[in-house]
Amino acid sequence: MPVKTYPQITDDEAAIEAARTGLAEWLDDLIPEVDDRTVTNAILEASTHGHITCVEVLTDEYEDRGITAYTSWETLQEAIEAAAANGHLEVLNHLLSTVCPGSDTLRKAELCGTTRGALGVAAEGGHLDVVKFMVEYAKVTDYPGHEMLGSECSALARAISGGHKVVVEYLLILEGCSWDFRAAFVAAVDAGDKALADRIYVQTPEKDELFIMLSCRGNLDALKYLSFLLGTGRVSSEAFEKGFETAVESAWDRVNMVQFLLDKKRASAKAINKAFVVVQDSDILKMLLEREHIWDESIRAVFEQATGNLSEYDSRRGQSGVRIIKLLHVKDCIPSNTIGKAFVVAAEKGQSDLVALLRRDGRISARMCALKQEILLHKVIIILRLKTWLEYVSLGGLSGFLQYMRTYP
């Protein structure tokens, strides 16, 4: 009968398995035979599964060896977050009391980011004891130039997304702490908790900036959040108008966002006209013209800007200028000299469609049409001279060039 064989594993593989399963004695026997990378990988494995004895054995070995490799440092950061994410408070406490960045400024900053991340994943997992521990740790730990409990911390938002109301309540009532209230507000609206979203909005120190930021996003979710905000009655006129101007200029989906904001009938004539002047999108201009009273001076300003854009090297701006001129040239408020200037620039830049359109405009004089012909003739002369120059030079070199100069003084 054949003898059954079993696959052999290396000492490094065995150490990882011992750390994963919590076999501290076996791990202790294996440690002298494994490399530095295996030691730190085993710390991550033991931390993930909450085996404190294994973590203690491994961190002692880590310190005894004086491991300094950056990859090992990164693995320790992962171990801290893994312990927090899985609610292993004892392991987390041990790691934070053991892992030391020394005088390395970069590692201090990274450890600060890691502890902030650990707080976030603990909140998302609903581990209240770990959250409380991390908050207290952050309060007594000094990382100069770095803030763990500040506006970059997403712990509150992640607790809301995770549906952990006890953790949310704890974080909301903490004194002396700040959170990423924008992300928290979005999470509350996503969760359908209007009362919570309202509480968060009240605590948000930069309420106007929140509205403006959402106006910039211009997607369907942003519209949902804006609808909620406007429903609270707490959005100031100044914030609404700034948000409107921002949406017109830079929202991702400007058409839907601007239409949504116009429907609210809260933007003043001044704000609407101010926004009109900075628009580079003919679709938005058309919407504003159809729905709002646009002042004559605003229309003239946009037309003149569009004429200037015809001369831009950026082809996109030039094409935008063409579309805007085609839209606005029918407006009676645009004087003949402005139309004439657009006609001349269009002729110079070879915009034949635009030239044909403007040529039919009653404000274009016969002199302008003649000027257009002169411009085209001038271009033909330049091309012919260039062709002749190339022929002379190719045939006669320097002497050919001199002969050309005598022919065309």
Image (tube, rainbow, N blue to C red):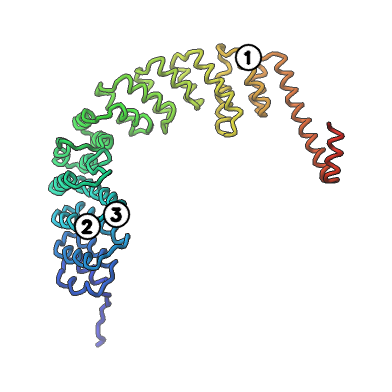
Vertical placement of 140 versus 323: above or below?
below
Between tags 2 and 1, which lies in front? Answer: 2
Q: Along the line of sight, which residue is nearer the eye, 193 or 348?
A: 348
The reply to whether residue 126 is visible in this rendering is no
Instruction: Say what secondary structure mark 2 lies in.
Output: loop
The tag on residue 337 is 1
The reply to whether residue 116 is visible in this rendering is yes
CB within 8 Å, label 3 to label 2:
no
Instruction: Say what secondary structure mark 3 lies in.
Output: loop
Amino acid at dot 3: Asp
Image spot of residue 79 (x, y percent):
23, 57
To which residue does mark 2 refer? Answer: 99
The tag on residue 104 is 3
Q: Along the line of sight, which residue is nearer the eye, 393 or 306?
A: 393
Amino acid at dot 1: Asn
Choose the circle earlier in sequence order: 1 or 3. 3
Choose the circle earlier in sequence order: 2 or 1. 2
For marks 1 and 3, give the CA distance.
67 Å
Choose the circle earlier in sequence order: 3 or 2. 2
Image point (74%, 18%), residue name: 370
